[in-house]
Image (tube, rainbow, N blue to C red):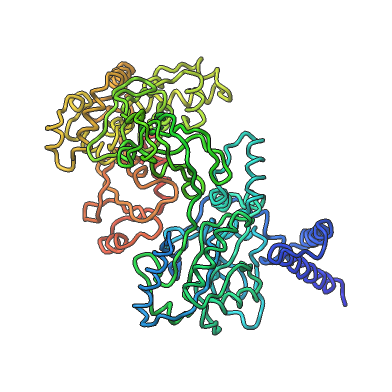
């Protein structure tokens, strides 16, 4: 045998050995060699492939880790919808589901498969000719995220399935999860790195799977259990779910050993009770049992209702509850001005965790449940994570309990609090409120608002923490000396930031109105208000009746506008903007010598753009003097063509409208940045 042939044989042997040991370790939990021996096999394979890159194959074990970071996730259309399940929270609800499917099927007797419902992330794995070619998240059930590179790092997912009876193309479906022990270690590592901990294993799994760099995902010990077959082509598959799971197991997929074949709904109920008691001993989080009709023929007959299959249901475990006393109700002011009440509790152990506070949602929810300060209350960890008060124990009241009243003034800044019509939340509308100032600053400088280049999130935080910016108007009073005093701000950066701030003074009025962050006023509403009133002063003087008389402005928006301009602090911010020469009336006049190179041109955008959100692209056109249309007409100058453009492209081709690809559109924007066409 020549050297080249011996090399190929050794590489094939190494891959087979490593795949075998991966299966023993990650699927069967029964390793045959030590970690050091496994590492030595992997090291030898990497060295051979490094020396002979022409022999590297996509399904090599070395290709699980180290792929270059992707810029963004693509969208995957699910060939067969990957839908979520309906829930049953009691035996009565389970029996009611059984009765419904019995009536639809015409039979009272059929078999089930019961599986633990893991608290993880559903994924679909597509194999073509035995190779893993695509992995996607559930998404909305019809379209998911392409996370193939990240899923390849999970060692219990086979990169290839080579058997004669393997379908030419098939999709395996499973639940990616993070084991409890791994979750604890991950949070300990994050704490050491002064990073915020993940709230629960599911969040950690989802965050890990959605990393843009697969090498980060590879550092997280994710695992998977396969729970079904989406579709298969080229070979006959079993006719029921249980045999299909056995078949997938034989192909090398990891299938939960706690799955059970049940001959009746009573056996399914017993399965649920057993695992309800044993759940704390599981190495992963499970929040219920999934009960599935076994026969595929019967599944097809039962079909779907809405976004849920009729033939399966998630029979949830009851959340852990405890009783304690509500000491007080505090108020947290959110980043958007919402006043969020929370319960201050006597510490109590719930599900193995000491709970001192709990969510109360809003004042309406407190009143609906008749929760009073001083009550004995039942507390549970909703979804086994977020503590909440279920109900007060009214029979244990002493008469000393106090009814909660939402404050009329913001507990942080003292400004007036309002409750907009039809809303559950009370809000502080003070744009200078310290509790929300940073979020308002981020919004003010963003692309859809004042579009101040160079003032990103890090600089916003630095300005806020240094006390240089307490409200959005303070941006226009910054000096070069102040900016140079901040970390990582050199003279060129400072010059660019100050130039961007000056340029933003000439944004159209609609952009200013939107940038102020008025509740319920989005970009389209800001355009309408700017067109109707023409100046910020006229808008500020508008009455409620005047506002609601304008088409498309309802009570919520009118009340929000009146309340915003009624706040003395907000009027002070507008005065500061005016003194800084920010244009607040009509169409802003551009700096002397500037041009509007797209005047007289009408653009229509069709399809998804990668570089901008739709509103941001439209804003770029408008600030250069162009007009944005909603449909293709003879007046349309250009159609900007993104991904999946739809019927507008056909219409544009019929009319001979000029087409711009996204790249050509970006070049046009770059050219017109300097007044050129």
Near-viewer residue (486 or 180): 180
Residue at x-position 46% and y-position 42%:
379
The image position of residue 204, as x and y in percent, is 57, 48
Q: Is residue 450 visible?
A: no
Residue under the image location 60 percent in, 36 percent down: 195
What is the quadrant of residue 533 in the picture?
A: top left
Residue 374 on image: x %, y %? 40, 31
Quarter the C terminus occupies: top left
Q: State whether residue 307 is above or below residue 603.
A: below
**In x, y percent, where is residue 274?**
57, 63
Quadrant of the image for the N terminus?
bottom right
- Compared to 617, does 639 lie above or below? below
Left or right of 120: which side holds 428? left
Q: Image point 62% across, 52% down: which residue?
A: 214
Q: Is residue 85 visible?
A: yes
Relative to residue 402, is residue 630 drawn left or right?
left
For image coordinates 55% across by 24% down, the residue present is 489
Tell how many labels: 0
Q: Position of residue 454 (x, y in %)?
A: 47, 30
Say if 675 sits above or below 68 in the image.
above
Q: In this view, does 573 lie to the left or right of 317?
A: left
Q: Which residue lies furthest to the bottom in this view?
A: 236
């Amino acid at each position: 045998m020549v050297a080249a042939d011996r090399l190929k044989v050794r590489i094939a042997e190494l891959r087979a050995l490593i795949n075998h040991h991966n299966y023993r370790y990650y699927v069967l939990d029964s390793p045959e060699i030590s970690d050091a021996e496994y590492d030595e096999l992997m090291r030898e394979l990497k060295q051979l492939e490094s020396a002979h890159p022409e022999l590297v194959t996509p399904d090599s074990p070395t290709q699980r880790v180290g792929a270059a970071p992707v810029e963004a996730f693509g969208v995957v259309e699910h060939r067969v919808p990957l839908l979520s399940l309906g829930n049953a929270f009691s035996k009565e609800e389970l029996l009611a589901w059984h009765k419904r499917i019995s009536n639809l099927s015409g039979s009272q007797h059929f078999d089930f498969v019961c599986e633990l419902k893991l608290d993880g992330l559903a994924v679909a794995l597509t194999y073509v000719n035995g190779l893993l070619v695509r992995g996607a998240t559930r998404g909305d059930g019809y379209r998911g995220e392409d996370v193939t590179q990240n899923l390849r790092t999970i060692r219990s997912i086979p990169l290839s399935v080579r058997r004669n009876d393997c379908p030419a193309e098939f999709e395996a479906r499973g639940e990616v999860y993070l084991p409890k022990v791994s979750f604890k270690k991950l949070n300990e590592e994050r704490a050491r790195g002064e990073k915020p901990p993940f709230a629960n294993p599911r969040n950690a799994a989802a965050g890990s799977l959605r990393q843009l760099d697969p090498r980060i995902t590879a550092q997280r010990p994710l695992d998977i259990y396969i729970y079904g077959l989406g579709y298969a082509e080229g070979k006959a598959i079993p006719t029921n779910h249980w045999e299909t799971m056995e078949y997938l197991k034989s192909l090398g997929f990891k299938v939960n050993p706690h799955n059970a074949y049940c001959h009746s709904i009573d056996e399914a109920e017993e399965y649920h009770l057993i695992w309800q008691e044993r759940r704390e001993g599981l190495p992963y989080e499970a929040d219920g049992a999934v009960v599935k009709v076994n026969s595929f023929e019967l599944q097809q007959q039962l079909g779907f209702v809405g976004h849920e299959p009729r033939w399966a249901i998630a029979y949830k475990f009851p959340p852990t509850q405890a009783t304690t006393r509500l000491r007080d109700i505090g108020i947290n002011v959110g980043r958007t001005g919402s006043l969020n009440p929370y319960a201050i509790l006597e510490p109590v152990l719930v599900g193995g965790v000491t709970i001192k506070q709990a969510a109360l949602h809003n004042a309406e929810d407190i009143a609906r449940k008749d929760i009073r300060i001083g009550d004995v209350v039942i507390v549970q960890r909703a979804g086994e994570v977020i503590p909440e008060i279920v109900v007060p124990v009214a029979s244990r009241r002493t008469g000393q309990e106090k009814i909660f009243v939402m404050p009329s003034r913001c507990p942080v800044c003292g400004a007036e609090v309002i409750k907009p019509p039809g809303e559950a939340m009370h809000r502080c509308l003070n744009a200078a409120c310290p509790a929300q100032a940073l979020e308002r600053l981020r919004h003010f400088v963003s692309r859809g608002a004042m579009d101040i280049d160079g003032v990103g999130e890090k600089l916003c935080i630095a300005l806020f923490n240094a006390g240089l910016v307490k409200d959005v108007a303070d941006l226009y009073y910054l000096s070069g000396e102040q900016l140079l005093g901040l970390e990582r701000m050199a003279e060129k950066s400072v010059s660019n930031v100050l130039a961007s701030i000056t340029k933003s003074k000439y944004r159209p009025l609609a952009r200013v109105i939107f940038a102020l962050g008025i509740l319920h006023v989005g970009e389209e509403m800001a355009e309408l208000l700017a067109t109707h009133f023409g100046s910020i002063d006229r808008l500020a003087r508008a009455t409620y009746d005047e506002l609601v008389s304008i088409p498309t402005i309802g009570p919520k928006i009118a009340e929000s506008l009146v309340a915003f301009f009624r706040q003395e602090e907000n009027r002070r911010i507008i005065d500061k903007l005016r003194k800084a020469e920010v244009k607040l009336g009509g169409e802003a006049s551009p700096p002397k010598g500037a041009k509007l190179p797209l005047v007289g041109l009408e653009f229509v955008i069709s399809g998804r753009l990668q570089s901008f959100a739709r509103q941001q692209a439209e804003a770029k056109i408008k600030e250069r003097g162009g007009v944005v249309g909603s449909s293709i007409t003879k007046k349309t100058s250009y159609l900007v063509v993104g991904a999946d453009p739809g019927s507008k492209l056909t219409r544009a081709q019929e009319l001979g409208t000029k087409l711009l690809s996204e790249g050509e559109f970006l070049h046009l924007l770059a050219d017109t940045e300097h007044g050129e066409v």
